[in-house]
């Protein structure tokens, strides 16, 4: 017999809340607790740790301004503003997963409330619980581990029954697994508060789940999609009614009809620069209209930027009890299941009635419980206001009832991510809230066979919840699976947690291999929750594997530190790949993903792929700015940052490497330069010569001088030369103005030691220059007043523009170096000078090449890059950016947040059930695109692969023809002939009497390592009629 279900107690549902201090005393108490956690004095707030949170801070417009923690965490008295904690009551796995994401986001403080004791059943989805916690209060067991995720967030537990008195302390609350009566009461109370408390209700029942949001009678969304406002560079404005605005064809416009835009920097038609928002009409890729009658305006001459204005949106939410009667439109995820949301709306109400009536959930596989349950949705449907459902899918409801008690880890992860993001929306006003009901199912993940009720019975194991849905047969397959996870970052950590809880590779025949060649950095800690600050510098895969084993000690895991690439095919060899059941990509770059995809195709292994902001083969390639634009005529901050990073790498990495290459072996270096004999070699030799002569630094004061002269060269002299060569009225060879959109006419900067941005540029440049030359950095180097005194003493030569200077403005140019007929002679002269410079250096002198590292905020790398970019932006009147935004662009950071990671990996693990079962049709699988900001879910079946046929043969791209035996080429050709194919080209050669493997070695010069038992050949064939036949790759197994 199955163990009795826990008595359902409506008052003990899970609650998660964003707390607000009710009094000055409360505020002071919370501040004191946070001060103790943070090590601050008197609750003093500190700045957000941008190194830690850089990836989520760059999620589209999540924080327009990065507030101090006291602005959104702990209220300074008086008056006490709302803060942001979390509070679960009878905490379910879903609640803990969404709470984990909020802790990683650093929403604070956090409270959990429940009176339920943990059971073995809970271990199937709650990774904070272990066997030792069974029988303990769930929250009290989990709170220390939640707190361990982020010491900057205060986590507490309330073990008494939650009441509206408790809710009054919160700004937002999340309920999971509570009865509707309690939910109605709580929602009504939340709506009556001023301001209203945002109410979220979530529930997971096996492969079914729901979320409901009520953010009050009126909730203002400050930014519905979180994207940066779209902009365009104006090329012309007509004096018509309506006025036509044309923009340069540098980039397509993203405006839509009805958008509001403002104009700036317009010359001629200056009346549009009044800051008044104007509505877009007739939007096209490079033009649009506005309603203004511009016939009385000035005639457009040049310039102008048009910028989208993002309007706030007011949403009016229904109360839960009203929405339950009249739900309106449901948020859909899968349009092939269009009719299911209304059915699930009835199903969850019916489950609430069943629990009231029987005090428990329906028993898995129990026919009597199924019959009792099926009556309830039918009754509710009859009592409901039109429209009623014409047909109720009883088979679907049977699946719902049978698995309703189980909280599956993938479902909890997915819904935890969704709910966590809704909490962020409630707190920040950023992104469009879920409005209002969302229902989801993955019933296609169930086994294709009819489950035996005996197979669904619990075994008193940690997998009982999963067994109650899928049965013990599939559980055995999961435990014996051989899985390869590539990557151990945010995605990899989430996968390891999920797979450990699901029991994947936890059996005697199972094995999980994870590989990652990276080490843990501080910025990883905000999303890669298996890591802690004391793990910084350690191998990701090793630490993650140990953490996953702690979640489930039965996990059979092998952690490697190899990059999956052609260079490591001796590690990930044929035998390794052939033994796998499934491969999981947890990577953050397209190149590695494509490599793993090709290996999976080659070895015919299923691949599960996921990630953030992934560019697919159908996406347009990212547009690269022409080199001349970046170096001579930038018109946006991205161009400035691209140039800044290029200069950083040239000055501090490439040039020192070039110097060291020369000093290590002058003769070899000279030979290589003479052999090249081109403009690029000349330029490299010039850099080395300058670095070891006039730009050589011996003291820190020399470094300051170098930095000051660099400033003058970059932001004054070069601009003066450019505008001398191309004055403001310059024209092209076609007679059009040279300085027409999108080009911006630059102005030289005048250095001032009283300008903090100028002096901080000098500080960063001089410190990094000293590091490069191995010069000790004095204590006063970071003292701006002392630095200003020294820099003011630097003698700056006067600059006079020269005639005949060549400046590359051709957008097709790929190299800025100008070729000269006497490059070889110049190189010879430079090499002679280098030999003289080397004599003045002390023996063994080497420079330090500095590689750009964006995530160390103390190394001055981003200080220099942001300084270079912003000074250049100032030259060209381009809006400047702060260091964090500069880090995001220059560091090419992929925006990521824990909520979307949890959701994505939950969805992937639902697909894993199908892959391991190996019985599902392609129609059962799902590809998903999701955007939690909108929110938007788009699920679709995979596209079947193309089938190719010849006579009675058929194959797809997944097939590979394998031939056993050490054949000659003649025997190989006969093998094809027997299939009605004439092989007219074999890529390894045509020596008919030689063995194929020998032809590969001797003719194609193919290296065949000892661990490989076969070679692959590409064969071109035709049929009897001379038609080309595209056949699969052919593998000849010669060993």
Image (tube, rainbow, N blue to C red):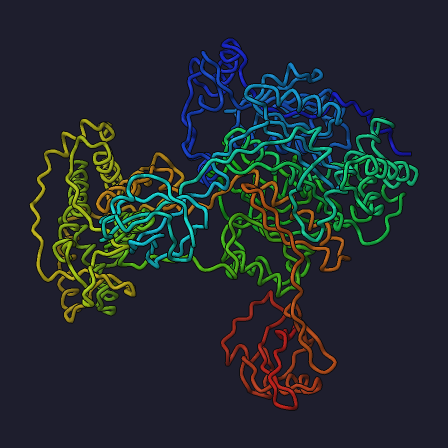
Residue for point 44% across, 59% down: 621
Residue toward you, 662 or 984: 984
Question: Compared with residue 448, is residue 500 higher up or lower down, i.e. above or below?
Answer: above
In this view, the residue farthest toward the top is: 25
Left or right: where 87 falls relative to 41: right
Residue toward you, 883 or 997: 883
Image quarter in which the C terminus is found: bottom right
Residue 888 in percent (x, y) is at 40, 43
Residue 38 in percent (x, y) is at 47, 21
Residue toward you, 878 or 288: 288
Residue 653 in view, yes or no: no
Residue 687 in percent (x, y) is at 20, 55
Left or right: where 291 falls relative to 393: left
Left or right: where 603 falls relative to 611: right
Left or right: where 281 falls relative to 760: right
Question: Compared with residue 139, is residue 294 higher up or lower down, i.e. above or below?
Answer: below
Residue 389 in view, yes or no: yes
């Amino acid at each position: 017999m199955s163990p009795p279900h826990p008595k359902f107690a409506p008052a003990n549902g899970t609650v998660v809340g964003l707390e607000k201090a009710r009094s000055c005393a409360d505020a002071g108490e919370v501040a004191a607790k946070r001060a103790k956690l943070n090590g601050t004095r008197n609750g003093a707030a500190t700045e957000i740790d941008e190194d830690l949170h850089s990836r989520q801070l760059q999620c589209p417009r999540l924080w327009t301004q990065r507030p101090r923690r006291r602005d959104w965490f702990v209220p300074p008295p008086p008056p006490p503003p709302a803060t942001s904690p979390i509070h679960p009551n009878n905490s379910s796995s879903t609640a803990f997963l969404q709470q984990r994401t909020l802790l990683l986001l650093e929403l604070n403080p956090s409270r959990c409330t429940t009176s339920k004791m943990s059971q073995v059943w809970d271990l199937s989805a709650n990774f904070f619980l272990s066997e030792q916690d069974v029988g303990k209060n769930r929250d009290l067991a989990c709170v220390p581990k939640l707190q361990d995720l982020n010491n900057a967030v205060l986590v507490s537990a309330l073990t008494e029954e939650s009441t509206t008195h408790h809710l009054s302390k919160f700004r937002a609350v999340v309920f999971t697994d509570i009865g509707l009566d309690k939910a109605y009461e709580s929602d009504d109370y939340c709506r009556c508060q001023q301001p209203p408390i945002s109410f979220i209700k979530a529930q997971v029942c096996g492969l079914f789940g729901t979320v409901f949001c009520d953010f009050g009678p009126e909730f203002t969304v400050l930014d519905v999609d979180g994207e940066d406002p779209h902009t365009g560079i104006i090329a012309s404005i007509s004096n018509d009614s309506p006025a036509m605005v044309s923009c340069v064809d540098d980039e397509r416009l993203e405006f839509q009809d009805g958008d509001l835009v403002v104009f700036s920097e317009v010359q001629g038609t200056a009346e549009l620069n009044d800051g008044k928002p104007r509505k877009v009409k007739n939007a096209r890729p490079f033009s649009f209209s506005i309603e203004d009658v511009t016939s009385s305006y000035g005639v457009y001459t040049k310039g102008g930027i048009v910028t989208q204005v993002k309007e706030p949106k007011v949403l009016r939410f229904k109360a839960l009890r009203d929405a339950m009667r009249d739900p309106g439109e449901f948020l859909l995820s899968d349009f092939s299941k269009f009719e299911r949301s209304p059915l699930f709306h009835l199903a969850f109400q019916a489950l609430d009635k069943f629990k009231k009536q029987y005090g428990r959930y329906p028993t898995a596989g129990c026919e009597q419980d199924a019959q009792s349950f099926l009556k309830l949705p039918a009754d509710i449907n009859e009592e409901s206001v039109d429209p009623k459902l014409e047909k109720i899918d009883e088979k679907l409801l049977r699946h719902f009832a049978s698995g309703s008690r189980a909280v599956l880890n993938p479902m909890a992860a997915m819904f935890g991510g969704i709910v966590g993001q809704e909490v962020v929306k409630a707190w920040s006003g950023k992104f469009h809230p879920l409005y209002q009901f969302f229902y989801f199912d993955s019933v296609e993940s169930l086994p294709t066979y009819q489950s035996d009720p005996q197979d669904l019975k619990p075994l008193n194991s940690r997998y009982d919840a999963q067994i109650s849905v899928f049965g013990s047969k599939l559980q055995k397959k999961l435990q014996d699976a051989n899985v390869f996870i590539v990557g151990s970052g945010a995605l990899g950590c989430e996968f390891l947690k999920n797979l450990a809880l699901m029991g994947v590779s936890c059996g005697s025949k199972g094995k999980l291999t994870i590989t990652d060649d990276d080490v843990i950095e501080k910025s990883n800690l905000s999303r890669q929750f298996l890591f802690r600050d004391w793990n910084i510098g350690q191998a990701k895969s090793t630490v993650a594997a140990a953490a996953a084993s702690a979640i489930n000690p039965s996990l059979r895991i092998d952690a490697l530190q190899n990059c999956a690439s052609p260079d490591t095919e001796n590690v990930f060899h044929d035998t390794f790949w052939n033994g796998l059941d499934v491969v999981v990509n947890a990577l953050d770059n397209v190149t590695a993903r494509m490599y793993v995809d090709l290996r999976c195709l080659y070895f015919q292994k299923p691949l599960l792929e996921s990630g953030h902001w992934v560019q697919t083969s159908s996406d347009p390639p990212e547009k690269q700015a022409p080199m001349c634009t970046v170096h001579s005529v930038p018109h946006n901050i991205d161009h400035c940052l691209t140039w800044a990073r290029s200069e950083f790498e040239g000055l501090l990495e490439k040039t020192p490497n070039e110097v060291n290459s020369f000093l290590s072996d002058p003769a070899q270096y000279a030979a290589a330069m003479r052999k090249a004999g081109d403009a690029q070699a000349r330029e490299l030799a010039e850099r080395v010569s300058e670095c070891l002569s006039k730009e050589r630094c011996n003291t820190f004061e020399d470094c300051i001088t170098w930095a000051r002269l660099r400033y003058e060269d970059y932001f004054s002299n070069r601009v003066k030369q450019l505008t001398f060569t191309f004055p403001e009225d310059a024209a092209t060879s076609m007679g059009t103005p040279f300085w027409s959109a999108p080009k911006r006419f630059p102005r030289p900067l005048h250095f001032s030691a009283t300008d903090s941005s100028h002096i901080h540029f000098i500080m960063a440049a001089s410190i990094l220059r000293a590091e490069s030359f191995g010069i000790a950095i004095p204590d006063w180097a970071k003292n701006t007043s002392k630095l200003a005194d020294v820099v003011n003493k630097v003698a700056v030569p006067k600059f006079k523009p020269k005639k005949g200077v060549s400046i590359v403005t051709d957008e097709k140019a790929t190299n800025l170096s100008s070729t000269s007929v006497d490059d070889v002679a110049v190189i010879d002269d430079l090499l002679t000078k280098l030999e003289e410079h080397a004599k003045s250096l002390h023996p063994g002198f080497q420079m330090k090449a500095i590689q750009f590292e964006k995530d160390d905020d103390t190394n001055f790398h981003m200080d220099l890059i942001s300084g270079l970019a912003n000074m250049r932006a100032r030259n060209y009147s381009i809006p400047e950016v702060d260091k964090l935004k500069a880090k995001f662009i220059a560091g090419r950071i992929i925006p990521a947040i824990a909520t979307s990671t949890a959701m994505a990996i939950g969805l992937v693990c639902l697909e894993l059930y199908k892959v391991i079962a190996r019985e599902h049709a392609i129609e059962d699988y799902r590809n998903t695109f999701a955007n939690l900001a909108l929110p938007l879910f788009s699920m679709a079946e995979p596209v079947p692969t193309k089938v190719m046929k010849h006579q009675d043969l058929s194959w797809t791209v997944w097939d590979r023809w394998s031939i056993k035996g050490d054949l000659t080429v003649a025997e190989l050709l006969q093998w094809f002939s027997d299939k009605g194919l004439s092989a007219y080209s074999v890529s390894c050669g045509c020596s008919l009497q030689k063995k194929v493997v020998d032809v590969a070695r001797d003719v194609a010069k193919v290296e065949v390592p000892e661990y490989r038992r076969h070679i692959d050949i590409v064969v071109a064939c035709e049929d009897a009629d001379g038609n080309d036949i595209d056949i699969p790759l052919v593998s000849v197994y010669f060993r």
